[in-house]
Image (cartoon, grey):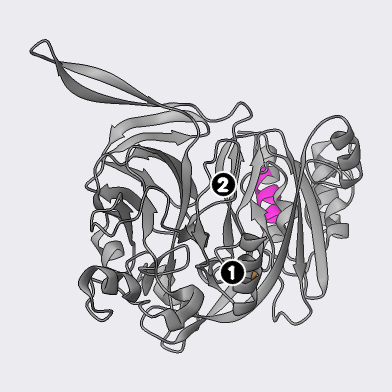
């Protein structure tokens, strides 16, 4: 490589790194000066004179300039408006007590955004003046300059818009204070999911079974329509000091305090009411770990996921943390794994979902029973990553298909091929947010 180019490359890397990590830059500084110089010598001099590279950006450097949104809508695109408000608040943890959570809209995970491929997603992040630090919002469903995700100061708000070009599921998360403390903000709860439905809908599910015909074992294709009942499971970790504050040293060591699914360790397991129904005694647990066991816990009381047999289920799994998720359902085989509307696997026992990665699991529960979705890393299972599915009515309680409600935070907003489900309020969220969710469900 030409030495001058390599010096140039180093200067660019240093300058860009400076922009990403500096806590003081402003958007005005970044829109900056066009480099238009006759030679590399003067390139380098100009870079030196201005104290580093100032990347040239379009004036409104989101993928869609905000003043063009109305025009695009008038041309036929659909607009999905997302309002996120940063809110730091103490929330409960398994074992009693609370931790210092950072949230979008008072809930962990943040609200799920659902759109269709080709929609415009317009996101406004508001950081109230009561917040102690700035926050950001990095949307993995977008394709735009990272500069858009920079820090929003307390008392400010920021809006960007993008076209959801790629179907699938994508995390969004706080980007900290221009990357600084991003780990703390995300591990403390500032993350959520965006589901982008394929423009032409999901694909039907085909599951192969065997049968005996004319004295011979044969393979039979079972076809399930694209319409499915849906769940979302977002995996993360907590790294905490004894007082509930964030422990960055534990994070660097991957020394997990608890593993959480949608914010809870063991949040989707039977509760005291179900103990009573099955064992006649609310104190007699039917599952090995039931830390959220009392109706007094309101929105925090645990609740298993009730599923019907013979029905197509679509489960959006997202790894929001920094440990791998080996997604497995004890007693089941995942019939299909889809990413970006492309099939990645069929008939797999376990599927690896890396950090900041998602996958859609399609499956049909064939037989009544209890099935446990885990992160098949034993440290994760025993620190919280076990989610109980109750299929059919294995305990003969007398309910029919779809009669039992499911936790509201495990059921994503309806999309193109969603079969609705009954819901009950369940969330790692403030009482105010739980009341809003209850209201939206009733009306
Ligand atoms: Cu934040």
Tell me the tag on residue 107.
1
Q: Position of residue 67 (x, y in %)?
A: 92, 45
**Number of the front mark, 1 or 2:** 1
> Where does label 2 land, which residue?
170
Taking the image in four quarters, ligand 1 sits in the one at bottom right
- Between the C-alphas of marks 1 and 2, the distance is 18 Å
Q: Is residue 67 above or below residue 435?
A: above
Give the SS element for disc 2.
strand
Magenta highlight range: 9-17
Q: Quadrant of the C terminus?
A: bottom right
Q: Is residue 254 above or below residue 206?
A: below
**Residue at 40% from the left image edge and 85% from the top image edge:** 96
The answer to which of marks 1 and 2 sits earlier in the sequence is 1
- Cβ atoms under marks 1 and 2 closer than 8 Å: no
Residue 174 visible in rendering = no
Q: Is residue 86 above or below residue 80?
A: below
Report crowding for label 2: few under 14, some 14 to 19, many 20 or more residues within 10 A (C-alpha). Answer: many
Question: What secondary structure prevails in the magenta region?
Answer: helix
Q: Position of residue 311 (x, y in %)?
A: 38, 38
Give the SS element for disc 1.
strand
Residue 84 visible in rendering = yes
């Amino acid at each position: 490589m030409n030495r001058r180019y390599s010096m140039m490359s180093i200067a660019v890397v240093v300058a860009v790194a400076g922009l990403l990590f500096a806590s003081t830059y402003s958007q005005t500084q970044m829109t900056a000066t066009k480099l238009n110089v006759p030679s590399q010598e003067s390139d380098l001099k100009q870079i030196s004179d201005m104290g580093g590279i100032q990347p040239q950006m379009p004036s409104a450097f989101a993928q869609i300039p905000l003043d063009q949104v109305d025009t695009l809508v008038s041309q036929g695109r659909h607009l999905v408006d997302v309002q996120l408000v940063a809110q730091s608040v103490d929330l409960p943890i398994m074992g009693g007590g609370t931790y210092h959570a950072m949230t979008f809209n008072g809930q962990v995970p943040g609200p799920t955004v659902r759109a269709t491929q080709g929609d415009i997603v317009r996101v406004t992040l508001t950081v109230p003046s009561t917040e102690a630090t700035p926050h950001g919002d990095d949307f993995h469903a977008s394709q735009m300059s990272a500069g858009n995700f920079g820090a929003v100061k307390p008392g400010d708000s920021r809006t960007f818009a993008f076209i959801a070009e790629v179907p699938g599921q994508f995390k969004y998360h706080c980007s900290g204070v221009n990357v600084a403390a991003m780990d703390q903000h995300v591990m403390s709860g500032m993350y959520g999911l965006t589901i982008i439905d394929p423009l032409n809908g999901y694909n039907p599910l085909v599951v192969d079974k065997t049968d005996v015909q004319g004295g011979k074992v044969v393979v039979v294709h079972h076809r399930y329509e694209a319409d499915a009942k849906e769940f979302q499971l977002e995996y993360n970790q907590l790294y905490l000091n004894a007082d509930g504050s964030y422990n960055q040293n534990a994070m660097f060591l991957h020394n997990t305090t608890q593993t959480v699914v949608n914010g809870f360790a063991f949040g989707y397991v039977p509760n005291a009411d179900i103990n009573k129904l099955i064992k006649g005694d609310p104190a007699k647990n039917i599952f090995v770990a039931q830390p959220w066991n009392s109706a007094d816990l309101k929105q925090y009381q645990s609740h298993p996921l009730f599923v019907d047999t013979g029905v197509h289920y679509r489960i959006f799994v997202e790894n929001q943390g920094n440990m791998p998720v080996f997604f497995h359902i004890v007693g089941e085989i995942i019939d299909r794994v889809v990413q970006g509307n492309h099939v990645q696997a069929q008939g797999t026992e376990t599927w690896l979902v890396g950090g900041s990665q998602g996958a859609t699991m399609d499956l049909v529960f064939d037989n009544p029973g209890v099935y446990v979705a885990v992160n098949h890393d034993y440290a994760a299972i025993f620190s919280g990553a076990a989610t109980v599915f109750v299929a059919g009515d294995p305990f003969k309680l007398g309910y029919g298909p779809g009669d039992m409600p499911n936790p509201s935070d495990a059921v994503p907003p309806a999309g193109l091929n969603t079969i609705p489900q009954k819901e009950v309020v369940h969330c790692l969220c403030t009482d105010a947010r739980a009341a809003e969710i209850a209201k939206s469900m009733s009306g």
